[in-house]
Image (spheres, grey):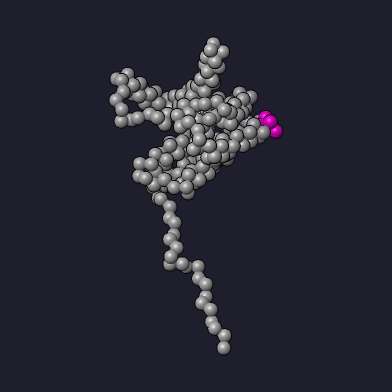
Amino acid sequence: MTELKPRKTLFNPGLKRRGIYILPNLFTTAALFAGFFAIVQAMQGDFERAAMAIFIAMVLDGLDGRVARMTNTQSAFGAEYDSLSDMVSFGAAPALVMYEWALRDLGRLGWVAAFIYCACAALRLARFNTTLEVTDKRYFQGLPSPAAAALVAGLVWVMIASGIPGSDYRWFSCLVTVFAGLTMVSNIRYYSFKDLNLRKSVPFFAIAAIALGFALVSISPEMTLFGFFVLYGLSGYVLAAMGLFKRKIA
């Protein structure tokens, strides 16, 4: 008579299931939805809504990490999920929106420019994830992908609000798209704003400047947001030029 061996089961009472935190991943999912919504709207020809959705994804992407830190719900899953969401919202979505709006008229060059941006966004996110622990937290290495997406989507939004078709500015749009992509994978440093202390007292003019910013956004959100990110995109080159000038003097 042979001895019956106990059947193996998938359930192990000594093994704890790993769950995921709902709150921060809820914001990440919302950002992912906004990026997917932008792609859908671009395919349907509603480029203004597509551009606005990318900016909404930026706001949601900025909230998920802060919510996770405030509630002490950081996790490796959340970090990976956020990176994949960023690839859709700030990599694929802006490239597709710009291609459908203006670059399609350039033929092969148009989709090559859109692919350069998309590939650079993927490389930027991969480099960010692998160098997160060794880089200076005060600066980003290369233009952050949300800021690059704001340049591309902001240009589309401004032109549509001005009644200018994409075909009229297809070459300029191509230049902006390639510029945003290559700047993401450059070694140019950009201020990260991560060392700002919101609990610290600030001068009166800082509050007045914030109030002015809200007023400008309410009057012309597309021009204000696009103008801000244009200045931010150029700020890294200005800092690099200033550093080079100082080294030559020294």
Quadrant of res 116: top right
Is 107 one of the magenta-colored residues? yes
Give the main secondary structure, helix, strand or loop, of the magenta stretch: helix
Residue 77: x and y in percent read 48, 49
Residue found 54% across the figure and 20% down from its top: 240
Is 168 one of the magenta-colored residues? no
Residue 67: x and y in percent read 38, 42
For the N terminus, the image quarter is: bottom right
Residue found 68% across the figure and 31% down from its top: 109
In this view, which residue lies farthest toward the bottom?
A: 1
Relative side of 138 to 103, left or right: left
Residue found 46% across the figure and 67% down from its top: 12
> Camera-side residue: 121 or 173?
121
Residue 49: x and y in percent read 49, 36
Residue found 29% across the figure and 20% down from its top: 204
> Camera-side residue: 106 or 242?
242
Magenta extent: 106-110
